[in-house]
Amino acid sequence: MRALNPPDCSAIRAELRSILRTAHWHPDAINDAELAFQELFINAWQYGGSPAPAVLVSLCPTVLRVAVCEDCPTLPEPRIPTDPYAESGRGLHLVRALTHRSGANPTKTGKVTWFELDAAA
């Protein structure tokens, strides 16, 4: 049975924030990275069947890459909610708007959904 509440991702968000602050990223870019990460993480939990999705974060040297691994092999497709007041359906659009590149790759056991964000020049 699936838990009703998503797993806590605050420690990962704090670590992501710390990494980017240490690298002297602009606060707006840090906020964008945190929000994009949270969208991917919650989607992996909600739609991917992963009770606690694995997260990989890399920063080399001016490109942040965040990847979230999940068990569902179905690649995500952005939806357009027909109801303007719908509570879901905008997450992938938000990730694409906040980041420079994003996508999903199949794996042997599911998929990895990811985004990349470039440091401000």
Image: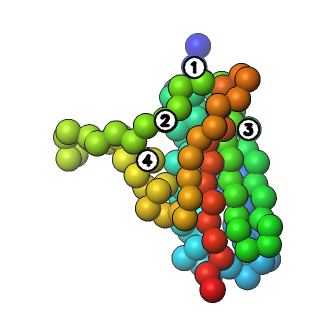
Report the residue at 78% width, 58% height from top: 58
Q: Secondary structure at mark 4?
A: helix
Where does label 3 land, which residue? 54
Where does label 2 land, which residue? 76
Could you tell me the amino acid type at mark 2?
A: Pro
Q: Which label sits in the foreground, 1 or 4?
A: 4
Q: Residue farthest to the left? A: 83
Q: Which label sits in the foreground, 2 or 4?
A: 2
Report the residue at 20% width, 47% height from top: 84
Residue 96 appears at what percent x and percent y?
47, 56
Report the residue at 58% width, 35% height from top: 44
Q: Residue farthest to the bottom? A: 121
- Dot 4: few (<14), some (14–19), or many (≥20) neighbours within 10 Å? some
Q: CA distance from mark 3 to mark 2?
A: 17 Å
Residue 52's label in the rendered image is none
Q: Secondary structure at mark 3?
A: strand
Q: CA distance from mark 1 to mark 3?
A: 17 Å
In terms of image quadrants, where is residue 78?
A: top left
Q: Name which of mark 1 and mark 2 comes first in the sequence.
A: 1
Q: Name which of mark 1 and mark 4 comes first in the sequence.
A: 1
Q: Secondary structure at mark 2?
A: loop
Where does label 1 land, which residue? 2
- Colour scheme used in the picture? rainbow
Q: CA distance from mark 1 to mark 2?
A: 20 Å
